[in-house]
Structure formats: structure tokens, C-alpha cells
Amino acid sequence: MLPVCQRYGMGVISYSPLAGGWLSGRYRKDADQSRPMSVARQRLANRFDMSLPENQRKLDAADQLAQLADEAGLSLIEMAITFVLRHPAITGAIIGSRTMEHLDAQLAAADVVLTDDVLDRIDEIVPPGVTLNPADNGWISPSLQPSARHR
């Protein structure tokens, strides 16, 4: 969708550039995942149940991205938000800060520039167009389903 929006000059506001906390450092392979899930996370258990293979793939990717951010001298938060904002079709991002500490960490991304080698490595970790957990795609319009595309 982004290339189409860019081609026709349509603005795009991205939401959740930290992927619901996955790119904030909250979820890690070596972290204690035994703490209780919030009500919101319980409703979306297929996106946050760490025992699912799909979420294990997300943990692997988050760890690799955190390592890349560290090597680039950035926080994972800075790298994730900058990655979203750097896309030429993106007009802005809804960052969803809940505390001043979160806001300060996220606003630091405004001054970050990602080099082409960092962008290439991000694409190696999670290739463009790949969804590690299909549950993250959210709602999909029934009109986009194959059965609805018939004439």
C-alpha cells in the first residue's frame, strides 16, 4: 500500500511503530515472561503468547534488531521509530507514549539517521512484506478475500 500512497501523494500515518511493545525491549528471549498479561494483551493472546512458534520468531527478530541497534549506537526504540519515519510514503507516526519517560525515549528518534547498511540489515532480519505472525495483520476486509475478488 505504501508505494501506491506515495505515487498518488496520499498521506500515511503509521501507528504502533514499536509493534505493541515488541520493539521497545519489553519482550526478550531471556526475559521473565511469567508476569501477568494485561487485559488488552489477554484479548490478543495469539499476538503475545510466547509459547507460540510465531511469537518465538518475533522474539528472535526483536533480539537481532536490538543487537543491530546496539551496534549502530542506537536504542531499539530509536531505530524502530526512525525506520518508520524514514519511509518516503510515511507522513507521521502515532507513537502512543503512556509516560514522560516513554515520550522522551521516543522523541530521541527525531534526530536519528539510519544508514543504508543498517537499513539493509533490518531488511535481512525481517524482509519487506513479511509478517512473522499472521495474527499481527489485524482485521482484513472481507472484500479483499479471494472469494470476494471474483467478477
Image: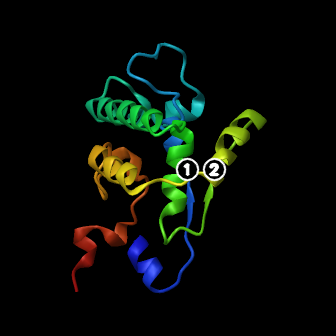
Q: Which residue is mark 2?
A: 95
Farthest right residue in view: 100
In this orientation, which residue lies closer to the viewer: 90 or 131? Answer: 90
Residue 110 against residue 132 in the figure, above or below: below
Residue 17 seen: no
Q: Where residue 75 sits: x, y (%)?
A: 54, 36
Measure how far apart labels 2 and 1 are at the Cα level.
8 Å
Q: Quadrant of the N terminus?
A: bottom left
Q: Quadrant of residue 45?
A: top left
Q: Where residue 66 sits: x, y (%)?
A: 44, 33
Q: Are marks 2 and 1 in contact (CB under 8 Å)?
A: yes
Q: Quadrant of residue 3?
A: bottom left
Q: Which numbered marker is on residue 91?
A: none
Residue 74 seen: yes
Q: Residue at x 33, y 70 (%)?
A: 144
Q: Which residue is mark 1?
A: 81
- Left/right of residue 67 with respect to residue 12 in the rendered view: left
Q: Secondary structure at mark 2?
A: loop
Residue type at mark 2?
A: Ile
Residue 56 against residue 147 in the figure, above or below: above
Q: Residues within 10 Å of mark 2 (few under 14, many from 20)?
A: some
In this orientation, which residue lies closer to the viewer: 51 or 78? Answer: 78
- Left/right of residue 29 with respect to residue 57 in the rendered view: right
Q: Secondary structure at mark 1?
A: helix
Q: Where residue 48 sits: x, y (%)?
A: 43, 31
